[in-house]
Image (spheres, coloured by chain):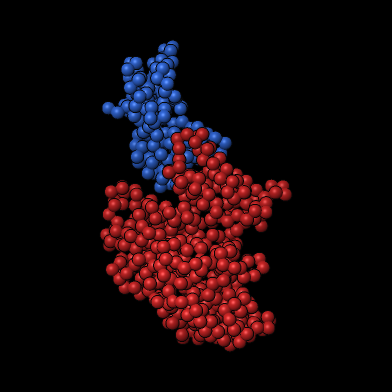
Chain colours: A red, B blue
């Protein structure tokens, strides 16, 4: 454990949370007209929040709110105190911009140090950081956490796969920090140099995140590299990577809830859901200075669990993200998450295949096409065998997800992978 | 010398210009196609090629986003007289070896056919034919 608060009694954690929540609310109410107006509209003042449960009375903040105040409109400190700015890619409209004071940077280092410690990393380790350095929080987030624990950092950043693999090998990297799809891409590239080449890597574990990942893909990354898979969750609006991650004892991610307060809500009604139930993850920052954020709708679907963990940490744990509120599509009344589709394909074929879901209308009914890329691993010399793969996937989708999809096998270059985020859903109905 | 020939099986979508994309690609890399066969389903097919440098062809295809794999096949010389094809089929049938597919080699100077049988029966098929005095090609 990096910090003893991670294993503190629940009362201590909750006391800390309530104290920090109250301070945060006082600050946003005083310093931003955006929050003051929203609170006033609901007839709520910071002093009305007396317990942690009262947080449900507060209004939500959405991504659009950040865009509406582009770039620095919601910052609560003068720019002289802001030491860093990051930004998300902004696929639609303006990007979202986030700022950090020095104390925000210290919190980020702290939570990332916890992440690395959970993955078994110490000052003895060499971290190969293949997250992109730049406005994206991945590169610098994984960089500063590695520095905090005293590990050696290789700031490889993204791209130049061949060179990265050479450096990872020659510098004896023990920890790989990367997106899971890039980790697989690296393996596929390394494999071309022969199986003897793969034996000489010193990797023991990896810290992976930044994209929704099915169990099948995680297991594949772990298997091909022969390393422990540690998942890291985060988003720039909250801090970047470091909101939560898993230890070696379970797949559930410990949420650093002394800094980020998590809730699960019904994404339609906004009602808070009990532990164990899946819904949209909502996070309130408890210590952020530059850009505090109240009840931020992450759009990520997960659930919270309070059963104690074998590692001794008492922090609440969250399930790995099962889908996105905005990725979720309803096909003839059935909810379909892309991650479930990925899971079904991985279970049916034994390997993770790249895919894309296309929803469309046929008359009054919804129809769904799933394009699945044929990799060398599943390719057969027989047309009948290939037809069988297609039918098998169709059957498992019908049996497991209750959807009648038309599976279409496509060539590997058809769908984008590892460069940027893969487009998993194309909804032609909207 | 081994009588096993490495055939390249390539996944192709059934869409305009697909085949010419592959042949153009291989031609530009000076890969010579010795034999070609296409087997198709409704929306995709398997293109089977025998080329002069199959390892390099596979790498080129992979780099350009095509999935491919090697398939072990063998080539049988078939004389231009009645019953010559039949003698091959009969020899295999006697040993209960099932033929998955067969096609002619397009540019062979002598008449020849490519045969694909199940991998576990490959060695047996080759031995059977050689025993029956049928000539198999070492390379194409």
Q: Residue at x 54, y 35 (%)?
A: B41
Q: How many marks?
A: 0
Q: Please name the residue shown 33% across and 57% down the image.
A: A165
**Depth check, front residue: A417 or A180:** A180
Residue B88's x, y, as percent? Answer: 40, 18
Identify the image quadrant of the C terminus of chain A.
bottom right
Q: Is residue A298 visible?
A: yes
Residue A91, percent across and down?
Answer: 55, 64
Residue found at the far top of this picture: B82
Q: Out of A129 and A4, give the one closest to the viewer.
A: A4
Residue at 43% x, 54% y: name it. A219
From the viewer's perspective, is A211 left or right of A203? right
Residue A162 rendering spot, x and y as whole percentages: 34, 55
Can the viewer see residue A300 in this picture? no
Q: Quadrant of residue A45?
A: bottom right
Foreground residue among A335 and B33: A335
């Amino acid at each position: 454990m990096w910090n003893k608060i991670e294993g503190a009694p629940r009362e201590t954690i909750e006391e800390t949370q309530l104290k920090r929540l109250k301070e945060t609310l006082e600050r946003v109410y005083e310093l931003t007209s955006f929050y003051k107006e929203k609170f006033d509209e609901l007839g709520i003042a910071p002093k009305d929040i007396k317990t942690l449960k009262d947080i449900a009375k507060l209004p939500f903040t959405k991504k659009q709110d950040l865009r509406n105040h582009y770039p620095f409109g919601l910052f609560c400190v003068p720019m002289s105190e802001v030491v860093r700015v990051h930004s998300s890619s902004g696929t639609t409209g303006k990007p979202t911009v986030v700022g950090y004071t020095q104390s925000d940077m210290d919190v980020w280092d702290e939570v990332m140090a916890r992440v690395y410690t959970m993955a078994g990393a110490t000052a003895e380790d060499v971290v190969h950081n293949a997250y992109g350095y730049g406005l994206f929080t991945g590169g610098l987030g994984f960089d500063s956490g590695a520095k905090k624990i005293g590990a050696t950092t290789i700031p490889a950043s993204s791209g130049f796969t061949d060179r990265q693999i050479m450096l990872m090998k020659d510098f004896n990297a023990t920890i790989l920090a990367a997106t899971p799809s890039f980790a697989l891409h690296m393996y596929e590239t390394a494999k071309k140099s022969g199986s003897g080449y793969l034996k000489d890597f010193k990797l023991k574990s990896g810290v992976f995140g930044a994209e929704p990942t099915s169990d099948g893909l995680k297991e594949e990354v772990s298997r091909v590299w022969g390393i422990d898979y540690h998942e890291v969750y985060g988003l720039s609006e909250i801090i970047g990577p470091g909101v939560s991650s898993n230890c070696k004892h379970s797949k559930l991610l410990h949420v650093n809830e002394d800094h980020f307060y998590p809730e699960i809500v019904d994404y339609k009604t906004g009602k808070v859901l009990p532990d164990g139930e899946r819904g949209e993850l909502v996070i309130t920052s408890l210590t952020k200075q530059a850009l505090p954020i109240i009840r931020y709708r992450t759009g990520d679907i997960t659930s919270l669990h309070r059963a104690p963990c074998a590692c001794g940490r008492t922090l609440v744990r969250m399930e790995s993200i099962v889908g996105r509120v905005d990725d979720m599509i309803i096909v003839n009344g059935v909810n379909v998450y892309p991650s479930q589709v990925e899971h079904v394909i991985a279970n049916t074929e034994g390997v993770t295949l790249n895919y894309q879901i296309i929803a469309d209308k046929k008359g009054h009914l919804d129809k769904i096409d799933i394009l699945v890329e044929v990799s060398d691993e599943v390719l057969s010399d027989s047309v009948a065998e290939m037809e069988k793969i297609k039918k098998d996937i169709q059957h498992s989708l019908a049996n497991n997800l209750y959807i009648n999809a038309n599976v279409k096998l496509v060539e590997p270059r058809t769908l984008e992978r590892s460069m940027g985020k893969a487009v998993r859903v194309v909804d032609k109905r909207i | 010398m081994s009588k096993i020939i490495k055939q390249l099986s390539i996944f192709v979508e059934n869409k305009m210009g697909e085949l010419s994309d592959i042949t153009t690609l291989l031609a530009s890399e000076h890969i010579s196609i010795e034999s070609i066969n296409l087997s198709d389903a409704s929306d995709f097919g398997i293109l089977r090629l025998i080329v002069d440098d199959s390892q390099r062809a596979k790498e080129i295809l992979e780099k350009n986003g095509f999935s491919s794999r090697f398939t072990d096949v063998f080539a049988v010389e078939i004389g231009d007289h009645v019953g010559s094809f039949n003698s091959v089929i009969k020899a295999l049938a006697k040993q209960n070896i099932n033929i998955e597919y067969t096609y002619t080699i397009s540019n062979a100077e002598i008449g020849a056919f490519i045969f694909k049988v199940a991998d576990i029966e490959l060695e047996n098929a080759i031995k059977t034919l050689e025993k029956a005095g049928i000539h198999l090609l070492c390379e194409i």
